[in-house]
Image (cartoon, rainbow, N blue to C red):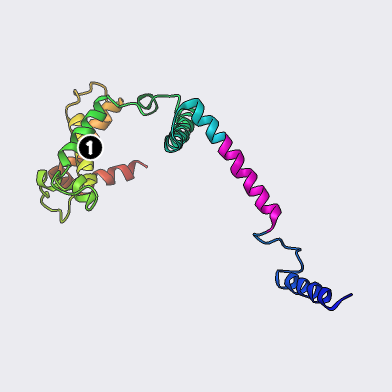
Amino acid sequence: MSSELKDTVKDHHNNGVEGGGGGSNPSECDPCIEERKSRGRVLWGRTEKKLRDKSGLTRNGLYYVGGLLLLLFTLLIVIVTLVANWPTTPHHRRFPVCKSDSCLRASSQIQLYLNQSASQCRDVWNWACGSWMSHRTIPDGYSKWNQRQELRQQEATRIRDLITTLPLPLHTNTVKWKLKHFYESCVEIDNVNTDEARPLTSIISEL
């Protein structure tokens, strides 16, 4: 082997080592890679040419149409998803509006207590209950007053009016007669103070 041939083989071997192991990892200059890229370009160019010939569009127009078709396909997927997840029962049937007398009274009270000047996001309590105290006064003997105490007082007043307006029972062994006389005996403070312990003493003596 001549010296020139040895130098050529040696240079080729050195280039192969520097290029990553003698060609085991093909570089971008590999003719196989270049051939695949050129085939892809040719195939896309032919397809693009066919589409342009059939549609009569330019290259930019073809891109616009492709983008529009992709957008329409995405919109179709969104519509199908919404239709599939749409509730079968209408909202007004799932959550019916209460139209009874109690609901109407409660809603009118809520509307009365609202403070429309307050912010719903920054001060929810003031917006929902800010006007309640402006329509109420604290009764004598109370240091504070709230809606629970007011409802309790209203219920006590309603029960008192119901008992006091009962017609006088004719029979002493009925529940109405016992209820009416028991209540009257409790509210008649003057008679309670006068009798003192005599009613209790008579009951104990009968035992």
Going 20% across and 25% down the picture, which residue do you hit?
A: 166
In this picture, which residue range is highlighted in magenta? 30-46
Task: Classify residue 2 by image quadrant.
Answer: bottom right
User: Is residue 18 placed above or below 101 in the rendered structure?
Assistant: below
Give the position of the C terminus as an image quadrant. top left
**Residue 5 % position (x, y):** 83, 73
Q: Is residue 54 left or right of residue 153?
A: right
Task: Classify residue 58 by image quadrant.
Answer: top left
| Residue 157 in view in this figure | no
Give the position of the N terminus as an image quadrant. bottom right
Q: Amino acid at mark 1?
A: Glu
Going 25% across and 43% down the picture, which residue do you hit?
A: 199
Q: Is residue 188 left or right of residue 202?
A: left
Q: Nearer the viewer, residue 142 or 112?
A: 112
Q: Nearer the viewer, residue 173 or 65?
A: 65
Q: Main secondary structure of the magenta part?
A: helix
Residue linked to disc 1: 155
Q: Residue furthest right?
A: 1
**Residue 83 % position (x, y):** 46, 27
Q: Residue furthest top?
A: 170
User: Is residue 109 placed above or below 122 in the rendered structure?
Assistant: above
**Residue 89 % position (x, y):** 43, 24
Q: Residue furthest bottom?
A: 3
Check residue 37 for magenta coloring: yes
Q: Is residue 7 left or right of residue 87?
A: right
Secondary element at image label 1: helix
